[in-house]
Image (cartoon, rainbow, N blue to C red):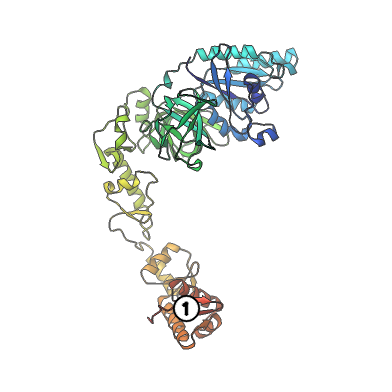
Amino acid sequence: MSPVTLGTAGHIDHGKTWLVRALTGKDTDRLPEERERGISIDLGYAPLELADGRRLSVVDVPGHERFVRNMVAGASGIDLFLLVIDAGEGARPQTHEHLAILHLLGIERGVVAVTKADAVDGETLELALDEATELVPGVPVLPVSAKTGAGLDKLNAALAAQADELDQETLAGPARLYVDRVFSLHGIGTVVTGTLWSGSIGEGDELRVEPASHDVRVRSVQVHDEAVDRAQAGQRVAVALPGLERHQLRRGDALVQPGSFPVSYRLDVVLEELSPIEDGARVHVHHGTTATFARVARAGPRHAQLRLAEPVVAARGDHVVLRAETTLGGGRILDPAPPRHADPARMERLERGELGSTIHAPIREAELDHVAEGKLTGVERAGEWVFSQAWLDELRNELERRLADADPLDPGIPPPPDPWAESIMPLLGLERRGAKLYRPGAAPELGERHAEAAELEARLGLDPVRVEDRRLARFLEDAGRLVQVGDGFAVSPDAYDQARRVLVEECERAGRITLARFRDLLGTSRRSAQLLLERFDADGLTRRIGDERVLRRTTARR
């Protein structure tokens, strides 16, 4: 039997952690607050020895509704479930939600343990067993007691039998591990743990942390605190990664064979809905150990494109769970790096298996050999990156639409937040100025705001006028049509020059000037004089000494 990971599920206080402790001898509540409060908050792990000598990796998940996010992270990547139901309470809200999540993740094999069997009478226990059988048909249902040990041997045997029935073909392929914990150990450095979804990992392997784009070399590997030469898919694995600091990694990162999995901000999926998911809905997308916000672009009754706030590392056939206040549904990924538009016909062909694997997302030149079935006709190269022409056209059209919608006062837009962004600019015919992209030769314009600008200029004088629109103020100042003073105020250029002459003449005569003296010379308010003096300080004309200003040595009369 290939290595197998078992995940618990069930409502809070139904005895998941107590049952795992009785089966494995290990307490999976490791956090002080978990022990103080008596509830599981984060994921816990333990090895389970089967009667025939084989070993399962156990992931114990929290049952409280506030920690369903952690539950999904733990359930992703497991092979078998152990659903726990309290004999006295029966199925409760998180029992049903956890069971739905397991189904959405494609985890169909497991065992139901009806716990605390020693605490109820025979009739109540029989009713609980009947309810569990009806709730999860076709799955073994067993009464157990973590307190007395009753039924644990039968539960162990049932788990072994279910593990024997698993189809483990999906565990082949390149290495992929989703990080669920990151910590540092003295003398070892940064360590990540997770369930190895596919492939194997051994000492000396050169891998990549995505989407952070860190190249790493594995120092050592452990499975349940025991050093191994090579960890296999289906095992709980700890990997030591020298050269990386703890803060450079986080739950949700993927440790993968370089070039084997795309990093994408979009996923095309076939949906399974528990509650209606509207077009444009904002949801949490759970994939692997990652949770990120996304917008749903419906592409028909069964398909959608998920437009993610943060990139994910995914493969075709992976499952996602969609949540808001509760679990709304999920999906199976049809394309982990699709085109930018949600194409219903294309998704239907993908679901029928009529489309091959086409490269849409940028890939590194050095990683071309790793791309299976990649269609490399019609590509452009820039630096270390390779882009398909179709993808470039889509990106160019999207950026052109954003540029067309940009404010004429500042006709630039932020560039894509991707590692290939700098390389791609020459191919798009755009200019990068500072932190924004512009069309060649594009310059700020007033557009339809000439009347607004004229009205503002008509109000300007020596007393500062509030300007609500900072972008308009900056445009007019760059054009020499106003001078900004203070935070959100402006005066006319003539007034600024007048005040400057008055200040320079007084400082040259008296050597210094006070706020009160400057106010009197201008015949304005204390607030107006203060704002002008602060602007002169910022311009390098004056410097403040106590309550007075003096001219800087480099000041020259304008």
State the quadrant of the C terminus.
bottom left
Residue denoted by label 1 = 462
Q: Is residue 497 left or right of residue 97?
A: left
Q: Is residue 260 left or right of residue 46?
A: left
Residue 302 in view here: no
Q: Position of residue 296 (x, y in %)?
A: 45, 37
Q: Residue at x 40, y 29 (%)?
A: 315
Q: Nearer the viewer, residue 198 or 470?
A: 198
Q: Position of residue 512 (x, y in %)?
A: 50, 83
Q: Residue furthest left?
A: 377
What kind of element bears circle 1? loop
* 58 w.r.t. 327: above or below: above
* 498 w.r.t. 81: above or below: below
* 293 w.r.t. 331: above or below: below
* 408 w.r.t. 376: above or below: below
Residue 235 in view here: yes
Q: Nearer the viewer, residue 410 or 422?
A: 422
Q: Residue at x 58, y 36 (%)?
A: 325
Q: Position of residue 219 (x, y in %)?
A: 45, 32
Q: Amino acid at mark 1?
A: Leu
Q: Position of residue 228 (x, y in %)?
A: 48, 24
